[in-house]
């Protein structure tokens, strides 16, 4: 195809799109658009929701065998009150702009899934520190937004909390610290850390 | 031959009777429980809430843990206790720092990080539950630990 004919096709398509439609009324066009919009939006949202629950998260064995088994031992899986925090509660933002961005990042994870980057426990262990550091960094950046969706330090009753909790919470919050500064490894076991990381994370 | 046989028989019979008698008031750890019935499960004890350090009873005693340690992991990868009790973090967390004995290995070498034999803290340090003592105990701390 020569460049000229290519330009021609583009031009003609553009004209067709801009040309007023004479066979359909404006109302019917608008309603068609409206219906299509609903379908697209609905489909989009359905896809977002379908990939936003625990069953989906652990449908790949990388997650099922490693992180899920550990998470099952923690307070966010089983506790006194029976309220559970699932994977997306902590790993996917609630608000949709942030959520959308996170889902795009997840495509990169799918790419690595296909490459098999962490498809054995050994490979996962080897990558674990790096993965954990990503989560820590993003939680630090958002002031632990996902934790605060459920826990709000403004609503904490220090009188009800244990000695160590109330002391460090009051000190930490007035120093501008955030949940992930002190609560690393809350839902999974901590990665193996070398001395440099110990220093960096303060663990 | 016959006589020896009957003596052996009588002796062993006496022995069996004697042992049955002497064991009559020994209770198995499961309690008096017929084999075909399920034993009663003792109720779970509650862990004590966090509180100030508990006084020691003798100088070399590993202090008792005065706080909950439920779900704290100590494994090859990480040691939750050290995130508060290490020399790096004790100031921040307000915890007692581990003493120098925790850095000495079994050959007497002074190490710069926790000695392997002191890594698994709960081998020696334990938290407390709300429970009456199983047997009466009249132990009193040494004089140097009692204040009066």
Image (spheres, coloured by chain):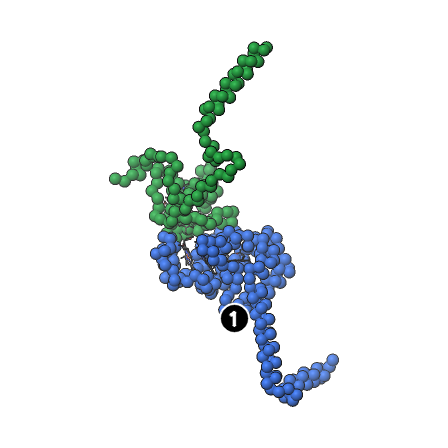
On the image, the x and y values in percent for residue A176 come to 39, 62
Depth check, front residue: A192 or B141: B141
**Which quarter of the figure is the N terminus of chain B placed in?**
top right
**Which quarter of the figure is the C terminus of chain B placed in?**
top left
Which residue is found at the position 35% from the left and 37% from the top?
B58
On the image, the x and y values in percent for residue A151 come to 43, 61
Q: How many marks?
A: 1
Is residue B98 in sight in this rendering?
no
Above/below status of A5 relative to B28 = below
Which residue is found at the position 73% from the left and 81% from the top?
A2
The residue that disc 1 covers is A97
What chain is the blue one? A
Which residue is found at the position 34% from the left and 38% from the top?
B57
What chain is the green one? B
Q: Secondary structure at mark 1?
A: helix
Depth check, front residue: A201 or A22: A22
Which residue is found at the position 53% from the left and 67% from the top?
A99
């Amino acid at each position: 195809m020569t460049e000229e004919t290519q330009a021609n096709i583009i031009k003609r398509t553009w004209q067709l799109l801009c040309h007023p439609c004479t066979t359909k009324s404006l109302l019917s066009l608008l309603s068609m658009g409206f219906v299509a919009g609903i379908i697209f939006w609905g489909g989009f949202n359905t896809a977002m929701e379908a990939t936003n629950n625990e069953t989906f998260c652990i449908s790949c064995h990388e997650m099922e065998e490693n992180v899920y088994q550990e998470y099952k031992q923690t307070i966010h899986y089983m506790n006194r009150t029976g309220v559970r925090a699932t994977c997306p509660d902590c790993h996917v933002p609630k608000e949709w702009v942030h959520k959308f961005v996170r889902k795009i990042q997840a495509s990169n994870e799918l790419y690595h899934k296909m490459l098999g980057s962490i498809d054995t426990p050994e490979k996962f262990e080897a990558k674990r520190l790096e993965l954990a550091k990503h989560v820590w960094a993003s939680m630090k950046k958002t002031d632990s937004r996902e934790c605060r969706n459920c826990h709000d330090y403004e609503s904490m009753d220090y009188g009800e909390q244990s000695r160590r909790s109330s002391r460090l919470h009051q000190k930490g919050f007035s120093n501008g610290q955030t949940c992930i500064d002190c609560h690393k490894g809350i839902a999974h076991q901590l990665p193996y850390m070398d001395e440099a990381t110990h220093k960096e994370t303060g663990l | 031959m016959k006589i020896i046989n009957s003596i052996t028989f009588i002796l062993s019979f006496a022995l069996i009777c004697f042992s049955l008698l002497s064991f009559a008031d020994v209770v198995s750890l499961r309690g008096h429980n017929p084999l075909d019935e399920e034993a009663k499960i003792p109720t779970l004890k509650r862990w004590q809430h966090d509180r100030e350090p508990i006084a020691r009873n003798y100088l070399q005693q590993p202090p008792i843990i005065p706080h909950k340690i439920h779900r704290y992991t100590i494994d090859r990868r990480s040691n939750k206790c050290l995130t508060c009790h290490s020399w790096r973090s004790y100031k921040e967390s307000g915890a007692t720092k581990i003493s120098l004995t925790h850095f000495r290995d079994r050959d007497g070498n002074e190490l710069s990080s926790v000695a392997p034999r002191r890594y698994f803290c709960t081998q020696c340090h334990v938290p407390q539950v709300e429970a009456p003592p199983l047997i009466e105990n009249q132990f009193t701390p040494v004089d140097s630990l009692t204040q009066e």
